Amino acid sequence: LHFVTQLSQAFALAVPHEETIKIRDEVGFFQAVRSRLSKFITGAGKAEEELDSAIKQIISKAVVSDKVVDIFEAAGIKKPDISILSEEFLSEVKGMAHKNLAFELLKKLLNDEIKLRSKKNLIQGRSFAEMLEKSIRKYKNKAIDSAKIIEELIELAKTMREAGKRGEGLNLTDDELAFYDALEVNDSAVKVLGDEALRTIARELVQTVRNNVNIDWTLKESLQAKLRIYVKRVLKKYGYPPDKQKKATETVLEQAKLIGKDWAEPSSVKMEEKEKTDLYVKDILSESEVDLNDKFVSLLPVYSLEAIATSFGKEEVVNQFGWMRINLPIKLNKDMFIAKVVGKSMEPIIKDGSWCLFRPDQGGSRNGKIVLVESHLVSDPETMQSYTIKRYFSKKKFTEDIFRHTKIILSPDNKDFKDIVLEDVQEGDFRVIAEFVEVI
């Protein structure tokens, strides 16, 4: 067994010299014998790298790739980058006398291909991994024999090869195809939109993600929240089924995390070139980084706007991002907090992406104030959520000692947006959560 290992290493060093190609079958034979013998020798289990090396050497001539496919280096043997398995190669594998070795060979190559695809296309990676696992499980449970498993793996290889061409047929780039697949295009409720609409959504999602990812954005919950809003907006714009939007949004964000790092803004961009509103995570301090004496004196807690809107004042735990240092000529107190506002409806006072200072609703007259409100009657045109930040106006009707709102107007400062008008508001339909103080 030791000599076969030395032979494999020497062969690995010599490939792709033409003399090594002439003896690849002989080397493969010795490796197959070694593999078989190792099963009967205690403690001589074959290492995955050695099996990879044996398999790669046998097929060194038969695999078609986008570059020269070298075998694993003798030291630290790396896995091959194989993108396409040719028809000739698959036919050769099907005719191999050693079916168990053919099975291991195909399993390894398909696993490698799936790993490559999983780095770019979330749905394809998951789908093919499940198909491969299902076939392997049947084989190991003796539900199918070695000949049948080889047939199934060859068919899977062909399916994967055809999947690689889908983008051309749909006139989509690889990135657009990945987001297209993330839209659950095979779901009956989604299919009714038609391919043209789904392709348009995929293209717009690519552009949306590309325009909104920054360095380390996957670590920034505030940026992820902003991107989530944009994705929901795109889905709603094209009539994506409402009951499917939540799952599709999360899948799209997972896909974005896979390839978004390639689109991230270069690190050479200087912070001073950015607007004041584009604050990064480094501006938010963790609990361990702050002094207790600085809390609510020079530091305030930072929350997500969604958490405040849906949980604040309901005796629910509101997840806190951390603490932010404030340099404003006002006295801070324990009622104040910070959240990032997304959207342009309150420009020029509140620019899109601004960190803002809030305090809980103080009661009394709110007319003319900018407030954060939540209501199942509200559907903000920018966030598509049941909460919004707008300037508040209301009309009341008094009956004896009580009153009720006959009309509430939530008015944007940016007149490119329309008022949100709520009429005959009942108790429990609407609540003012917080009052805007100023932009930090």
Image: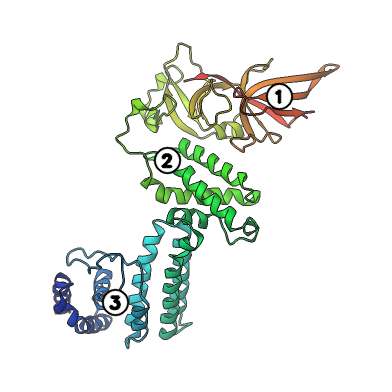
Q: Disc 1, disc 2: CB below 8 Å?
A: no
Compared across the picture, whether 27 is left or right of 306 comes to left
Residue sitting at 53 percent across and 31 percent down? Answer: 342
Q: Amino acid at mark 1?
A: Ile
The quadrant holding residue 279 is top left
Q: Could you say which is closer to the camera, residue 27 or residue 400?
A: 27
Q: CA distance from mark 2 to mark 3?
A: 41 Å
Q: Is residue 179 above or below residue 137?
A: above
Q: Is residue 149 above or below residue 246?
A: below
Residue sitting at 47 percent across and 35 percent down? Answer: 222
Q: Disc 2, disc 3: CB below 8 Å?
A: no
Q: Could you say which is closer to the camera, residue 101 or residue 298?
A: 101
Tell me how the rendering is colored.
rainbow
Of the two numbered discs 1 and 3 on the same chain, state the one appearing first in sequence: 3
Question: What secondary structure is marked by label 3?
Answer: loop
Residue 133 in view of the camera: no
Q: From the image, tell me which residue sits under label 2.
A: 213
Compared across the picture, whether 50 is left or right of 269 comes to left
Q: Amino acid at mark 2?
A: Val
Q: From the image, tell me which residue sits under label 1.
A: 409
Q: Position of residue 346 (x, y in %)?
A: 57, 24
Q: Amino acid at mark 3?
A: Ala
Q: Residues within 10 Å of mark 3 (few under 14, many from 20)?
A: some
Of the two numbered discs 1 and 2 on the same chain, state the one appearing first in sequence: 2
Q: From the image, tell me which residue sits under label 3.
A: 62
Q: Could you say which is closer to the camera, residue 263 or residue 114?
A: 263
Q: CA distance from mark 1 to mark 2?
A: 35 Å
Question: What secondary structure is marked by label 2?
Answer: loop
Q: Position of residue 379 (x, y in %)?
A: 66, 36
Q: Position of residue 266 (x, y in %)?
A: 32, 39
